[in-house]
Amino acid sequence: MTTRTLAVVSAGLSTPSSTRLLADRLTAATVAALRERGDDATVEVVELRTHARDLADHLVTGFANESLRAAIDTVVGADGLIAVTPVFSASYSGLFKTFFDVLDKESLTGTPVLLGATAGTARHSLVIEHAMRPLFAYLRAIPVPTGVFAASEDWAGAGGVDAELARRIDRAAGELADLVAGRPAQRRAADPFADVPSFEELLRGH
């Protein structure tokens, strides 16, 4: 049995929050799906609200303190990522975007990602498609086909979850588990083109 590492990024601002609740549901379903595929899983959660000041400092200094560096290393070193944000002004939250802004743009290349979002109304249900997928496409991650959006009314079913939301969670978790289970245990090989000199550097030699 191979042990996979899942990183969970939750950008909820309150305690408790529907964002963290969705993140926890997605995580539990993904761990269960990985076990069905013969893999074990360890989970590390990054609560972005605890790093809000650290992220602001990083933006103006260019350096991550020890706490934020540990969070970054957790995310970029994982075999799979679950990323969940509340919706602010029809998009992901500024805190969510800031965290992914401070990552090296190559650090999530090839990483399977399950995208989730929460809001008070279903009017924001397309936020995953029009805001989150382009962000992770830029980072060269691999978002699973099913994104999971949860509005306030989706938490009213049996066991606290609407039946349709529960089905979306299970489907998305299975898609993430398929991608993670199909990867090598080592996160990814070194980029063979990482040290190729730029065109300007090549010209300096002539």
Image (tube, rainbow, N blue to C red):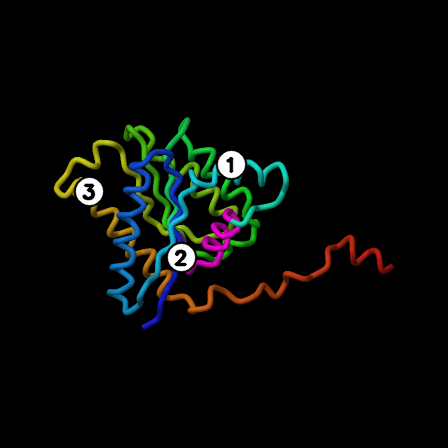
Residue at figure coordinates x 42%, y 32% from the top left: 91
Q: Would you call the spot at circle 1 few (<14 residues within 10 Å), some (14-19), or many (20 or more)?
A: few
Residue 185: x and y in percent read: 42, 69
Q: Where is mark 1, residue-wise?
A: 53
Q: Amino acid at mark 1?
A: Arg
Q: Which residues are magenta?
A: 67-81
Residue 99 is a magenta residue: no
Callout 1 secondary element? helix
Q: Give the camera-side residue of 71 and 98.
A: 71
Q: Amino acid at mark 3?
A: Glu
Spatial separation of the CA atoms under disc 1 and disc 3? 37 Å
Residue 55's place in the image compared with 183, above or below, is: above
Q: Would you call the spot at circle 2 few (<14 residues within 10 Å), some (14-19), or many (20 or more)?
A: many
Magenta segment, principal secondary structure? helix
Identify the residue at the far front of this view.
Answer: 66
Quarter of the figure that contains the C terminus: bottom right
Residue 84: x and y in percent read: 37, 42
Residue at figure coordinates x 51%, y 36% from the top left: 53
**What is the number of the mark on residue 164?**
3
Q: Give the camera-side residue of 24 and 88.
A: 24
**What is the number of the mark on residue 80?**
2
2 vs 3, front mark: 2
Q: Amino acid at mark 2?
A: Gly
Quadrant of the image occupied by residue 178: bottom left
Q: Earlier in the sequence, mark 1 or mark 3?
A: 1
Residue 122: x and y in percent read: 28, 30
